[in-house]
Amino acid sequence: MIEDAIEGLKKELESYGEWNQGAIAKMVADTGFHCKRCGKCCKNAWGDNTVSVFPGEVRAIVRATGMEWLEVARPMESCDADESGEYHTFEWALQKQKNGDCKFLKNGACTIYEVRPLICRTYPMRLESGCLELYECDGLGFGPVPAEEAESIAETLHERQVRETGETIMLLERFKPFHPSTRDHSGDKVYVVHDSEGSRRVLARADGGFSFL
């Protein structure tokens, strides 16, 4: 039941206040992480570089760049179709260039660095139930992270966990279930994107373009 899931997430969110930030900072320091500014995490050639973004993060990038929403983000791909043939997804993802690299990677640098999403700010780390998880990165294992930097990263990791859980709660509170179908659809697709602000319908054209419906 959605109501049970919401209550469980709310209790989980409350528990985050009990996490030991000092212990998290110590785990961060022990990773030996020092960003090499190589940009591999933004490039398609080095693996999955998909970046999920919250609505508020999309808006921040829109304000900073002057771009439109669908120039910044697209519906996360999904195979969950309903009886009318529309596809349902629960996330937005940053747009990519034709070669698969992040749209905002130019000349090896991030052009939205000051407003980059939390997933980018915390890579290659994330918290799971207060434990630190690491992803593959050339910047790991280069000696202790300075205490002040480790504390800052720990705070951002905590912020990301709180934000992710809060966004999920708001999404579920607004979510209207649909009847799934195995219907296949080729060519243009209509996505229904469910997020913390409600639902939006987006036409994903076969030529790679997107538009709101």
Image (cartoon, rainbow, N blue to C red):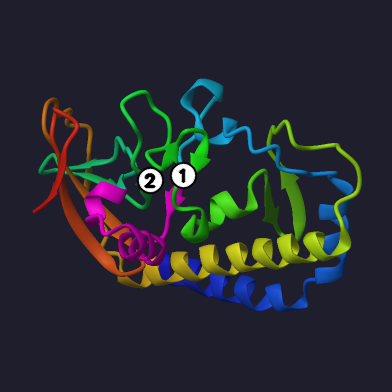
Q: Amino acid at mark 2?
A: Leu
Residues 76 and 185: in front is 76
User: Where is residue 123 shown, x and y percent of the image?
Assistant: 63, 46
Q: Secondary structure at mark 1?
A: loop
Q: Vertically, is 71 above or below 209?
A: below
The residue at the point 37 percent across, 39 percent down is 103
Contact? badges 1 and 2 (CB < 8 Å): yes
Q: Is residue 134 left or right of residue 12?
A: right
User: Where is residue 149 shown, x and y percent of the image?
Assistant: 79, 60
The residue stretch that appears in magenta? 51-72
Residue occupied by mark 2: 94
Which quadrant of the figure contains the C terminus? bottom left
The residue at the point 44 percent across, 48 percent down is 111
Q: Vertically, is 63 above or below 77?
A: below
Q: Earlier in the sequence, mark 1 or mark 2?
A: 1
User: Where is residue 74 shown, x and y percent of the image?
Assistant: 29, 45
Which quadrant of the figure contains the N terminus? bottom left
Query: Which label number is shown at residue 51?
Result: 1
Q: Amino acid at mark 1?
A: Val
Residues 114 and 44: in front is 114
